[in-house]
Image (cartoon, rainbow, N blue to C red):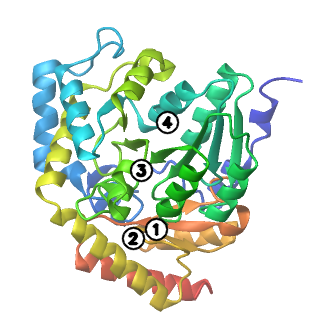
Amino acid sequence: MDVFDKCRDFKAAEDYKERGLYPYFFPIAENHGPHVIMDGREVIMIGSNNYLGLTKDPRVQEAAIKAIEKFGTSCSGSRFLNGTLELHEELEARLARFVKKEAALVFSTGYQTNLGAISTLMDKKTILITDKTNHASIFDGIFLGSGINMGAKIRRFKHNDMDDLENVLERTNPELPKMVITDGVFSMEGDIVHLPRMVEICKKYNARIYLDDAHGLGVIGATGRGTMEHYQLFDEVDLVMCTFSKSFASLGGFVAGTKEVINYIKHHSRPLIFSAAIPPANIAAVLKSLEIIEQEPEIVTHLQEIGAKMRREFKALGFDTGESETPIIPILVRNVEKTFFFWKALFDAGIYTNAVVSPAVPPDRSLLRTSFMATHSDDDLNIVLETFKKVGKQLGII
C-alpha cells in the first residue's frame, strides 16, 4: 500500500475533461465585473459572489493602490506580533459599529475566521449544534476544536428545521455549554435561516448563537446589514462573522461580538496567531467598500430587486429554484450528468454559472448555482433568461 494510491486511482476529473464537461478551475483572463473573458471570449458572469460589483469600482481600486504605496504589499507577519497595522484596527472598529456589536476581529480569510473563532470557543464540555448544510469552514472549525479538545460534542439538525433543532437541544445535557451555529443566507440554495424561531429556542435551552453571514452582509437587510437586520434581531445574535470575498470586494474575514469574547479569541486563536495578517491593499478595499455600502444603501436595494426579478422569471419559465429568497438562485437539476451538460451548453452560449454536485449538495439536489450582481444590466438579465429558456428546453429540464 502507498499513501499516493488514491491519487493514481482518481480518474473522475480527467474523464469529464476528455468529454468536454469539466466545469471547475476555469481561468478568467480579464474581469470586467458582470462580464469576464474566458476561453478567449466574453461571457456574462452569473457565478460570482461579487454581489455589489465593487471589485471593479474605481474608488475601491484606488484605495487599494494607495494602501500599497503607504504600507507596501504585505504585513510580513502575524497580527499577534508585527502584522497589525492601524488600518486593521480602524476596520475592526468600523465593522463592529456596522453590525452593532462591541468589538470585531479581522482574520486573513473567511475560512480562517470560522476555523479560528469556533475552535477557540470550544472546550471538552462544549456541545456545538450545527445545520447540516452549513459551510464547510464551519464544520472544519468544529473538527479542529474537537481535535484539540477531546470530548467536545457535535450535533446536527436538519436544514433550517427549527423543530429538529429543538429536538436536538431537548436531548442535550442542560448543564453543559451549548452554541448553535448557522449560516444566515445559505450559500448554495439562497434561503435565509429562520432566525426568529432559532432565537426563541436558544433562549429556552440557554444556547448561544453563532451566525455566519458571509452571503448576508451587503445582500439582505434594508441597509445591507444582513440577516440580523432582515429580522431586526441584532441583540439576539451572540457572534456574527462574515468574509470579505463577497460584498466587500476583497479577501479576509471578521467575527464580532462582545469585547470580552473577541478579546479571548484574539489571544487564543491558533489560525489568527500563526497566520500572516491580511495585506494592506485588502484592508483598504474593505474599508472603501464598507463606506460605499453605508453611504449608498440603494446599491443593496437594487441588488435585491434584481434577485426578486430573476427568481420570478426563472419560476415563470418552469425552473425549480428551491427555497431561494436572495440573489443566490439555484436551478435544481437533480442529476449530475445533466447538470454538467446544462453548464456546458450555457457556457457555449456565453453564460458562466456554477455546477454544484455532491458532496457540496446531496446527490439528489445537483444544481446550477446562479448569483447576481447589482451591476448586471437589464440586457444582461434578459440574455440570461432567454439563454436558460432555450437550453432548458433542449435538455428537457423545462
Name the amino acid, label 2.
Gly
Question: Against 386, is 225 above or below?
Answer: above
Name the amino acid, label 4.
Asn
Distance (Cα) linking label 4 and label 3: 20 Å
> Is there CB contact under 8 Å for labels 1 and 2?
yes
The secondary element bearing badge 3 is classed as helix
Q: Nearer the viewer, mark 2 or mark 3?
A: 3
Q: Nearer the viewer, residue 360 or 15?
A: 360
Name the amino acid, label 1.
Phe
> Is there CB contact under 8 Å for labels 1 and 3?
no
* Residue at the spot of label 1: 347
Q: Nearer the viewer, mark 1 or mark 3?
A: 3
Q: Which mark is drawn over residue 206?
A: none
Distance (Cα) linking label 1 and label 2: 5 Å
> Is there CB contact under 8 Å for labels 4 and 1?
no
Name the amino acid, label 3.
Glu
* Residue at the spot of label 4: 114
- On the picture, is 30 further left or further right than 191? left
Question: Against 274, is 159 above or below?
Answer: below
Q: Nearer the viewer, residue 170 or 34?
A: 170
- x 36%, y 14%: residue: 78
The secondary element bearing badge 1 is classed as helix
Specify the quadrant of the image occupied by residue 86.
top left
* Residue at the spot of label 2: 350
Distance (Cα) linking label 2 and label 3: 44 Å
